[in-house]
Amino acid sequence: MFGAHCRRSTTCFCQQQLQTEQSVSLNLNMSIFTPTNQIRLTNVAVVRIKKGGKRFEIACYKNSVISWRAGAEKDLDEVLQTHSVFVNVSKGQVAKKDDLTKSFGTDDQTEICKEILTKGELQVSDKERHSQLETMFRDIASIVVEKCVNPETKRPYTVSLIERAMKDIHYSVKANKSTKQQALEVIRQLKESMEIQRAHMRLRLVLPAKEAKRLKEKLKPLLQVVESEDFDEELEMVVLVDPGCFREIDELIRCETKGRGSLEVLNLKDVEEGEEKF
């Protein structure tokens, strides 16, 4: 009995050793044959571009791509899951350097990632796309509210009112354009169907006496309202202007007066208190 017990123990030990060796061999084989050009990522947003006849993809964090394109996110590391360019993100297949150089003229993967991020097509599910477009729609309406007023009352409109007005004109959100750009487009379209205008900026202009008369004539088309004028050794004016004209006015004063004139922003938005409602 003792001999039989020993034989069984020896047999069990040999079987266990064989299983261990097979397991180690299997693990070694798996490690040997695992492709070295694969990176596994999960929970990603994929941005894809086709260039030079080949498809390239980058892996981004969800909800970060639109923020980057809108200018809200500046940190590339908060957008990219990895500074690698893929031919297929879901399979973890990394693009070859030769293909990158031929298609983009460089193998600098960070620069290529930026180009794909800017120009590529964001791959999202229908549900995610719908949610993103809804968020952008609200953001556009909010920007319009921040920038505009009812020209008769000088009061800003409510966000819900602007959203309804955008729906009435059947405005379609563009996922690849910034919300600020689209807000300016919405303002132009809304002017055709409702009383709305950019809220004026209030500026103080100081012009040297010698250039005052000539420069005032040049500025006249850019000024919406002249609230006050005071001429002593120089001409001081308080005016309301469209924000879109600010840069032109600033450049005109600096160039024409050689730095002797000045421009001061008194109010970014000339608005009355309260919201405009139906």
Image: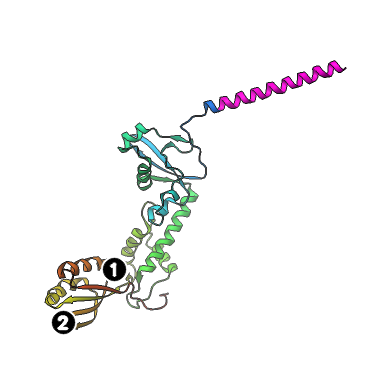
SS for dot 1? helix
Magenta-drawn segment: 1-30
Left/right of residue 143 with respect to residue 259 in the rendered view? right
Eyeballing the image, is 135 above or below 256? above
Residue 169 lies in quadrant: bottom left
Q: Check residue 243 in the rendering and tell me which mark sits there, or answer none.
A: 1
Q: Nearer the viewer, residue 68 or 151?
A: 68
Q: Nearer the viewer, residue 60 or 1?
A: 1
Is residue 13 within the magenta segment? Answer: yes
> Does residue 35 appear anywhere in the picture?
yes
Question: The disc labelled 2 sits on which kind of residue?
Answer: Glu
Q: Earlier in the sequence, mark 1 or mark 2?
A: 2
Eyeballing the image, is 142 above or below 51? below
Question: The disc labelled 1 sits on which kind of residue?
Answer: Pro
Q: How is colour applied across the structure in the image? A: rainbow
Residue under label 2? 233
Identify the residue at image location x=22%, y=79%.
237
